[in-house]
Image: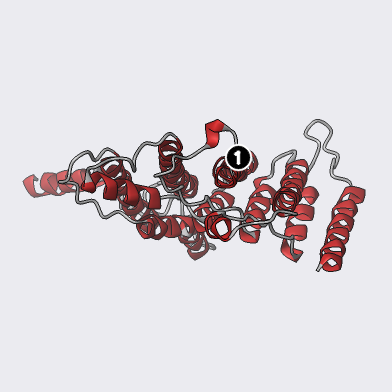
Amino acid sequence: QNNNDDDYDIRRASSRRPPPLSPARIEYDELLRQSRDLLDKFSSHDNATTSTTTTTLQLMDFDRVMTRLSRFHSTVDGANGSTEGTDMSASTAYGGYPDTSLKAEASDLCTTLLRALEDNYDRNHAAVRTGGGDDTDNTSMHHHHHRARRLVPNAASYNLALHALARSDKGGDVASEAVGVLTRMLDRCRRYRDAVNDDVRGDGDEVGRTTSSAMPPPPPSEPTIITYNSVLHAIARSGADDAGHLAEGAYAEMERWREECATHNGGREESNDERRRVHRYRGVLPNARTLACVIDAGAADSDAAGGKRSFAAERAQAVLDSAVEGRRAYVASR
C-alpha cells in the first residue's frame, strides 16, 4: 500500500512540473536577454561621464540581434509546419505556450532597439547643433561623444525592423506602424538637410547652425528601395481596411522625397569644401516590386462598413501609369 501511495505521489508531483519550453520560446528568451543587455549597455554608454568608461558597443552589435529578431518568424512558422497533420499545433505542442504571439513580441523588441538608436542620434544631433559634446577639454569625454555619434541607425536598421513588423501578424496596426517608421526616417533626413547642409552653405537659419568647432553628425540614412518596398509589403500583409490608401500614400511620399531631392540639389554651384562636407540625398525610383506591393495592398483594401473594395482597379492603373510616366521622365533627363 505504501509503495502504491509513493507511486501516486510521484505521478502527482510530475503532473505539477512546468511544461517544457518550445524551441521558439527558448530562442525568443535568448533574444530578449540579448536585447536587454544591449539596452543596458547603451544606457551606460550614454550616461558615461568619466574616463573609466570602457564601453565598446558598436552598431554591428545591434545589427546582429536585430537580424535574428527579423528572422524569428521563420522559427515559429517552421514549428507550425512541423506539427501539421498531428493532434498538436505549435501553440499547444509544448504545454500550451502561444508561440505565434512571440512574432509580435520579437517585432516589438526589434522596434525598441531601432528607437534606441534613433533617440541616440537625436540627442547627439542636438548636442552638435547647440555646440555641446565636442567642445570639451576632456579627452575621454571627447572619445565618448565620438563613439556615441557612431551608434545611429542605418538603412539596414530600418529594413530589419520593417521586415520583423511585416511578419509579426499583429493585424491592421502593422500598416500605421510601418508608415510611422518611414515618416520618422524621412523627417530626420529633412531636418539634417535643412539644419546641417544649409549651415555649411551659409543660407540656413540660426537655429540649425552648427558651431564652427563642431563636426556635423553623420547624415541619417535615407530610405532605400528596400525600405520603401518593406513598408509597402508590411501594409499589404496587415489586412488593414485602408491598406490601399496607406500604400498609395507611402508611394506618393517616395515620389515626393525624390522630387524634393532633385529640387534641393539642382542649380547650385558648390565649392570643393561644400562637396566634401555636404551630404546629398537622391531619392530612389520605384521598381517592379514597389508597384506589385502597392497593387497587392489595394487588392486587400476593403470598406469595413459594406465589404466593398474601396481601392478600385482604376486607381491601380493610375499607380502604374504614374510609374511609367516617371520612368520615362527620368530616362529623358539622362
Residue 27 drawn above or below residue 145: below
User: Residue 63, image x and y in percent?
Assistant: 41, 58
**Relative to 173, is 7 on the left or the right?**
left
From the viewer's side, name the closer residue of 227 and 255: 255
From the viewer's side, name the closer residue of 315 and 331: 331
User: Residue 62, image x and y in percent?
Assistant: 38, 54
**Picture quarter containing residue 249?**
top right
User: Residue 322, image x and y in percent?
Assistant: 86, 55
Work out whether residue 300 can be spotted.
Answer: no
Q: Which residue is mark 1?
A: 180
The residue positioned 12% from the left and 44% from the top of the image is 5
**Relative to 9, is 21 on the left or the right?**
right
- Where is the N terminus found, in terms of image quarters? top left
User: Residue 271, image x and y in percent?
Assistant: 60, 58
- Seen as rendered, the residue at the extreme left is 2
At mark 1, the secondary structure is: helix
**Picture quarter containing residue 243?**
top right
- Where is the C terminus found, in terms of image quarters? bottom right
Residue 10 drawn above or below residue 123: below
**Relative to 257, is 332 on the left or the right?**
right
Residue 89 drawn above or below residue 174: below
Given the image, on which type of amino acid does mark 1 rest? Gly
- Seen as rendered, the residue at the extreme front is 271
Work out whether residue 66 can be spotted.
Answer: yes
From the viewer's side, name the closer residue of 303 and 43: 43
Q: Dot 1, crowdedness within 10 Å: few (<14), some or many (≥20)?
A: few
The residue positioned 28% from the left and 44% from the top of the image is 45
